[in-house]
Amino acid sequence: MSKVTIIYYSGTGNTEKMAELISSALSEHNSVVSLLQVSSASKSDIEDSDVIIFGSPSMGNEVIEETEMEPFIESIKEAISGKKVALFGSYGWGDGEWMRNWQDRMSDYGAILLADGLIVNGYPEGNEEDRCIEFAKSLI
């Protein structure tokens, strides 16, 4: 049984809903899942997990959230090396450049990316909910 930690930031609830859908789908498939807002996460959460899934909305000029998620990612860059990682998040504009950049950055830190990052425009409803569930299933 895999220990999975989902660490996310959500300002409007879009990314939080994605995190909940992913968590629920993983829990149904015999994973032990911890769902944490980034403000409650620590380096030990990374070290103690088999799989880490990070979620952040796109902000500003297509970057991850800058006041909480960005500093957290920077603080765990050594701990993430060799860890299985997946990324997700919501956006309102752009073409997903922020996710591609985040994936490249995590690879540069030595993370083992399990899938292409999942991005959803706005709130995940209908088909987008299904995409979140399928994303989770692809990780196990």
Image (cartoon, rainbow, N blue to C red):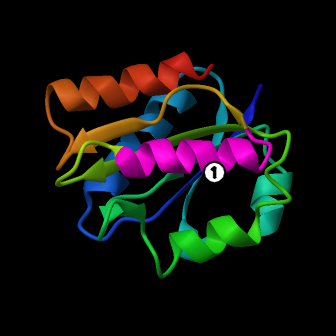
> Residue drawn 50% across and 49% down?
101
Q: Is residue 89 left or right of residue 13?
A: right
| Residue occupying image coordinates x 18% and y 48% | 123
Q: Chief secondary structure of the magenta span?
A: helix
Query: In this rendering, does residue 127 appear at all?
Result: yes
Residue 102 magenta-drawn?
yes
Q: Is residue 32 left or right of residue 23?
A: right
Residue 5 point in image, percent of width and height: 65, 48
Percent across and percent down for residue 76 are: 76, 64
Q: Is residue 83 left or right of residue 71?
A: right
Q: Give the range drawn in magenta.
A: 97-111
Q: In this view, does 140 lie above or below 94?
A: above
Kind of residue at badge 1: Arg
* Image point (26%, 40%), residue name: 120
Which image quarter: residue 9?
bottom left
Q: Percent x, y for residue 74? A: 69, 69
Q: In which quarter of the image is the C terminus?
A: top right
Reading the image, the residue beneath label 1 is 105
The kind of secondary structure element at disc 1 is helix
Quadrant location, the N terminus: top right
Q: Is residue 18 above or below residue 136?
A: below
Residue 135: image quadrant is: top left
Crowdedness of circle 1 by 10 Å Cα count: few (<14), some, many (20+)?
A: some
